[in-house]
Image (spheres, helix red, strand yellow):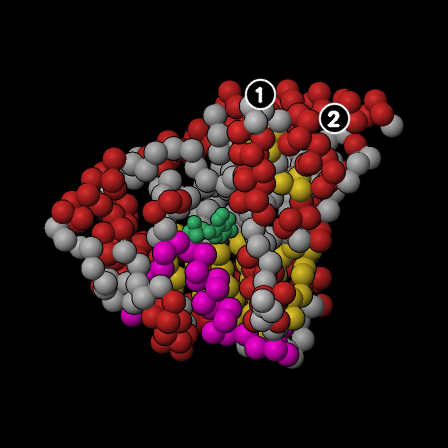
Amino acid sequence: MKLSKRMARLGTETAFQVLARAQALEAKGKDVVHLEIGEPDFDTPRNIRDAATEALNKGYTHYCNSQGIVPVRVEIAREMEKTRGVSVDPQRVIVTPGAKPIMFYSILALLDRGDEAIYPNPLYPIYESMINFSGARAVPVRLHEELDFRFDIDELKSKVTPRTKLIILNSPHNPTGGVLEEDDIRAIAEIAQKHNITVFSDEVYEHIIYEGKHHSIASLPGMLDRTILLNGFSKTYAMTGWRLGYAVMPPELVEPVVRLITNSVSCTAPFIQYAGIEALTGPQDSVPKMVSEFKKRRDLIVDGLNQIPGISCRRPKGAFYVFPNVRKLGVDCNQFADYLLNEAGVATLPGTHFGRYGDGYIRLSYATSQENIKKGLERISSAAAKIRSRR
Ligand SMILES: Cc1ncc(COP(=O)(O)O)c(C=O)c1O
């Protein structure tokens, strides 16, 4: 069978492949510490599960509005007003099965061959994959370790051309845990307005922040109309498997994106959307509890990694990932991640899975128990010692 040419341009997210490799080793009896998958290990709060059950029992089990049911869009609009101080018409809100399809739909709706999209590198790999799939040119801008994985704004400016149509942002950031500061956001908004560029702002980790605060570009004057704001329930409410995400879009993009939804998944399961209403309007105490536990784990993993000769790790301000620099071990990061999985029994991801500027790093997710983190650190430490002794 001959596949379409466009499939050669579509990448993937390797966390799922590494998970499958780790599970294959486990099936053969190997003990593996999982530090590869980016999902909270907490249960979805009880009130949200109850709301879904109630909605199921009430019969919200049929097709519904492709854009999302009105009551959840109204609550999302209220949430935007509460958290970002902007008035959002629920008509601009689009609900999807997980936040990920928003990347797919928006990029397909917006980019053509000949267009250029600027994106941070390293970054969640689906962005680069989707830009390439659309036929547009992917223009990476390096995130610098010494800037706590933020942009050098002058470097970003130098990448803008008359063909730049989109700038992608993600803060707090996967895979580095970096958080953009208010000055960064203001400078990027100025560039977008000056050159008439749309901004895609992925804010799925907005509540998982340990120092400072989340700054949303959509809250800056004039930016709501040129921002695709992506957000979701997976990370904040430990709802990864439910598949519930949303976007607030410039009005011109709403109809085309809803058309893409109708052409693909038709709609998001309505009983899941009712659970989303409960997540937004019900008790919020599970969120700070989870974040406070993540903070302890972050400190444990950062301190542990920094004690290993050859590895150095920044203390990220958000999300639940660390991105240690492993260059001084003198081994390629892909080989190191392979060695960790096959020999030491720790699943991690090489930095290059997040783009070319991830070379020399590995990504660890600390969305797992402190006990697992300690076990993982011991194994990484002995693996690094073995590698150093070979040199
Ligand atoms: C930066 C970023 N955006 C979006 C997503 C996708 O989230 P969802 O589960 O809502 O599709 C992820 C998942 O890991 C992510 O890391």
Q: How far separated are the C-alphas under marks 1 and 2?
A: 14 Å
Q: Is residue 36 left or right of residue 249?
A: right
Q: Position of residue 66 (x, y in %)?
A: 29, 67
Q: Which residue is label 2 attached to?
A: 384
Tell me the residue that label 1 is attached to. Answer: 375
Mark 2 Cα-neighbour bin, 10 Å: few <14, some 14–19, many ≥20: many
Tell me: residue 356, above or below residue 292: below
Q: Quadrant of the N terminus?
A: bottom right
Label 1 crowding class (10 Å Cα cut-off): few <14, some 14-19, many 20+?
some
Residue at 45 percent of width and 56 percent of height = 100
Name the secondary structure under disc 2: helix
- What is the quadrant of residue 194 in the picture? bottom right
Residue at image position (43%, 60%) is 101
Q: Secondary structure at mark 1?
A: helix
Residue 166 image position (x, y, % from top left): 56, 70
Q: Position of residue 386 (x, y in %)?
A: 78, 22
The first of marks 1 and 2 along the sequence is 1
User: What is the magenta range?
Assistant: 89-117
Q: Position of residue 253 (x, y in %)?
A: 41, 74
Q: Residue at x 58, y 38 (%)?
A: 21
